[in-house]
Amino acid sequence: MIKRILFTGSNGQIGSELSRAFRKIYGNENVIVTDIAPNSKVADDHYEQLDVLDADRLAKLVDTYKVDAIVHLAALLSAVGEQKPQLAWNINMNGTINVFEVAREKKLQRVFVPSSIGVFGSTTPLDNTPQDTVLQPSTMYGITKVSGELLGDYYVKKYGLDIRGLRYPGIISNDTLPGGGTTDYAVAIYYDAIKQGSYECFLSENTMLPMMYMPDCIKATTDLFQADFSKLKHHTGFNLAAFSVTPKDMAASIRKYIPNFTISYKPDFRQAIADSWPNTIDDSAARTEWQWKPNYDLDTMTQDMLKVIGDKHTKGLL
Ligand code: AKB
């Protein structure tokens, strides 16, 4: 039975909220959070500073805390990965193999490592992108995510390890800001809508991408983490979808609540990345193998995002 779980990258957009959700399920003392930053975002964590490239320290923490499973979130995302490709390879690949090797040596019960829609490229069918399809990404981030999926599947087959992962779409949230991704506009648009009533978007108005609200991301991750391993046919790269939207759709959704909201478009280098990613995703494998089903669509998410960010703004917390 899994009792104690160690997170890497716990200060990040997903790590900060997912580790909180795991503490509710597994107990505060059973979730060890680590990040490269000297301090945790949350004061009462079991926090340890960890560079995922330091395999010895990772192994030591696993021993010290008697860890049974690792949720490995530390990674560089797609946009920053294009600015620093060698660093992205180093952190994403060597960080991941360090986690897999510790899991193998210490016989850990489970590893969760996310993948991304970044695994797809322009040779993949862009509409209703299948689960099992061509994976020829054009970004270093995508290359590391495809390699991470293949490496994880190798450890499952060769060593019998239990490794699981999801291809996250763009994740939209209102707690910790994302950093360095191509889908980050979909978070910034809500903050700017509240703060200044307008947003300048770095993608063009009709760029459609798969997106998901954070509560669904938490649900998907915990559901897959707890799924019966023997029922899984796929392991490290489940397609995952909630809804697909363009910046124009998001602006229209925001205008339902902030009628004077305006948006302008100034595409930059991230446009080419977005253009190589799918419009819509077929996530039927996740729906069949571990009963995935999202709760939020664009408008229910917009309503909640604007309420939470609006409250923060009123309290002077932005
Ligand atoms: C990014 O934009 O790089 C990430 C992702 C979709 O993996 N949010």
Image (cartoon, helix red, strand yellow):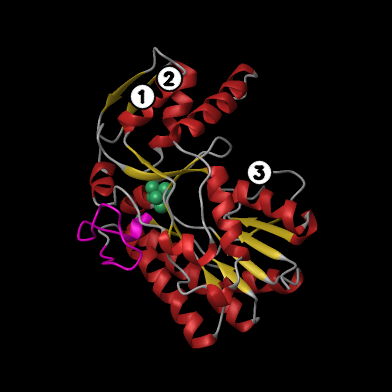
In the image, residue 311 lies at what x, y percent?
62, 22
In the image, residue 175 lies at what x, y percent?
58, 37
CA gap between label 3 and label 1 equals: 33 Å
Residue ID at (56%, 57%): 221
Quarter of the image where the C terminus is located? top right
Quarter of the image where the N terminus is located? bottom right
Residue ID at (46%, 38%): 297
Q: Which label belongs to residue 41? A: 3
Label 3 amino acid?
Lys
Nearer to us: label 3 or label 1: 1
Q: Is residue 213 above or below residue 158?
A: above
Report if the CB atoms under discs 2 and 1 are less than 8 Å apart. yes
Q: Which residue is mark 1?
A: 252
Q: Which residue is mark 2?
A: 256
From the Cβ of disc 1, is ligand 1 less than 8 Å away? no
In the image, residue 97 lies at what x, y percent?
49, 74
Residue nearest the viewer, comparing 82 with 15: 15
SS at mark 3 in the image: loop
Residue ID at (48%, 87%): 158
CA gap between label 3 and label 2 equals: 33 Å
In the image, residue 58 lies at what x, y percent?
63, 69
Residue 63 visible in the current orientation: yes
Label 1 amino acid?
Ala
Residue nearest the viewer, comparing 83 with 178: 178
Q: Is residue 7 above or below residue 205?
A: below
Please provide the residue range marked out in magenta: 117-136
